[in-house]
Image (tube, rainbow, N blue to C red):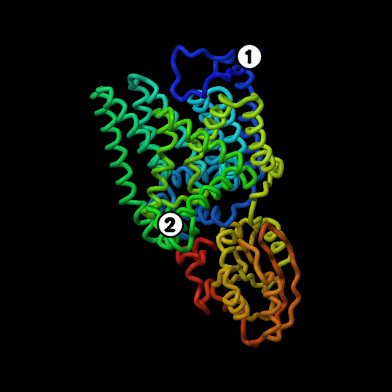
Amino acid sequence: MATMERSAEPRVEPSPARSTGAGGEPGGRWISIAAWVAVAIGVAMQVLHFSGGKPLWLDEAMVGLNIRHLSVRELMGPLDYDQVAPIGWLLLEKLLYGLPIPPEYSLRILALATGVGGLLIFRTLAFRALGGLAALAAVVMYALSPAILRYASEVKPYGVDAFVAVGLLWIGYELLQRERSPWLLLGALWLGGLASVTVSFPVVYIMATVGLLVFLKRAMQRQWVEAGTLAVIGVTWLAAFAFLYLTIYQPQAASSTVTEGAGASFFDNYAFAPLPPRSLHDVIWFGGWAQRTIEFFFGENARFGIVIAVAAGLIGFALRRSWAGALIILPPVLAVLASAFHTYPVYDRLLLFLAPNLLLLIGYGIGVVAARARPAIVPWAILLAMCVTGGIPYIQGNLRAQPQFSINNIYPLLDTLKAQRKPGDVLYVSNEAIPAWLFYKARYGLSDMPWIAGDATDVVWPCFIQDFTHYRTQGRVWVMILSVAERDPPVEDSIQIALGARNLKSDVKLAATGWNMWLYSLDLSPMDPDFSPASLPEAPVRKCSPDVNANRFDPPARAGVRAK
């Protein structure tokens, strides 16, 4: 039986003469098998969540409406619902949407494929760069990461960010470990970078790191032909990014209130680094940001073990001063520096492209502890504690096709509405529920149902009550409310208060429940004998000033015809 070598730290710059275990990888066959088991668990969870066909939630529905209704040419311009997305990713999703399968699957195929592919590539990179227990730890944490699992089954580009990042890091690592750069690898780096910049925004930080480090190493070696080739590669990357930014992304961002208000409204206080720090509060910011980032990737219970591993990894890389260490550490540094200029928010899911770097750092840290720990069980205890408190409870709680992060389940609501609607019924749709309603109403045969596009967001209750009670009808009014947070007072209490204040009779019945979504059937006494549901506008005039700090999801002007 192969045994683990504990006398040396995890490698980051392997020697060709270094011996390997029975499985051809450092640490022995049993560590290799354990890593494959972790990969299998991660792939199984990704496939399980994909197979559930959970409904598109708020953000996904907004993306889905763009992909469904906009032409290829229109996707290259400003998107509806304040969306901003890489053009290559949008075009791939447009192509996949044409498959003869439900959109819950077709639109998520890309996320699943890149989730599985990223995990497989990461395993190879981890064993090439770290080896042994360090590689195993990194692979296990990657496979069990709640963030990786979630975005492997969502119609968002964040999983693609992680995939292209790990692919470029792999190529960059191979180039850094060789004395000469094979032209095949240089070609893969060039083409991989050009393709990546079309499907991912933050991959530019990985590209800049890989290109700069390999160029510097070749220049220090006085290999001027290769250094010149890398310079040409960098220039073409920059030209491709500049073209996309000036022709597509800048117009997208200019039309998006989300990006315009990113500094104060959409993102929280941990999105932009206060550099240079000018107060104690600024210094504390970094601790709070690190805590939130760790919780996003691993859950709040894994913080202690992650902090130990990260600290050990940073110290180990600082002492070794290796090219591989710079490859792992530099991209997060660049991202934080960019956030200080408000060019990129370092905000949970927008950091998924850094998952390979963070997990390699954690794995290396565990390897550093393993090389010095006595007794030998200490590093294994740390790894086990991180899994038991982090990824394993998450997986245990999500061993179902509809995982815990399946939010805004609109299916039962629309089933109830389809079965119980009567002629003359009107549907009130709160502002945050509009995208999902527009995406799914045709599937349930509800395209002809009169509906009111709620003006108020759910976070502004006085405005919501005024918005709701403004409309009077002789028939029944169904109220569909999507709420992204707990409210005080509860939704039903607010409606009762609003109706009671107008002396209206009501019969409130909870028709279906979902994740923070409710559907009510209300019978309202007529206040205007001449009022007819047919006169209800599609998107009413605002009756109170909306909260400038709230996200809004009004149907765009061009959606009125498409949604019929």
Q: Position of residue 127 (x, y in %)?
A: 52, 24
Count how many numbered circles sit on residues in the image: 2
Give the amino acid type for the residue marked by disc 1 in the picture.
Ala
Report the front residue among 61 and 183. Answer: 183
Q: Position of residue 450 (x, y in %)?
A: 61, 71
Q: Are marks 2 and 1 in contact (CB under 8 Å)?
A: no
Determine the residue positioned at 45% across, 37% down. Answer: 165
Image quarter hosting the N terminus: top right
Q: Position of residue 533 (x, y in %)?
A: 62, 77
- Left or right of 230? Residue 489 is right
Report the front residue among 169 and 9. Answer: 9
Image quarter hosting the C terminus: bottom right
Estimate the spatial distance between the alpha carbons at disc 2 and disc 1, rounded to whole Å: 56 Å
Mark 1: secondary structure:
loop
Determine the residue positioned at 34% across, 19% down. Answer: 179
Give the amino acid type for the residue marked by disc 2 in the picture.
Leu
Report the front residue among 190 and 564. Answer: 190
Q: Which mark is residue 79?
A: 2
Quadrant assignment, res 231: top left
Crowding around mark 2 (Cα neighbors within 10 Å: few <14, some 14 to 19, many 20+) is many
Q: Nearer the viewer, mark 2 or mark 1?
A: 1
Quadrant assignment, res 192: top left
213 lies above or below 53: above
267 lies above or below 234: below
Mark 2: secondary structure:
loop
| Residue 470 in view | yes
Crowding around mark 1 (Cα neighbors within 10 Å: few <14, some 14 to 19, many 20+) is few
Report the front residue among 472 and 37. Answer: 37
Residue located beneath label 1 in the image: 2
| Residue 168 in view | no
Determine the residue positioned at 52% across, 56% down. Answer: 62
- Left or right of 226? Residue 461 is right
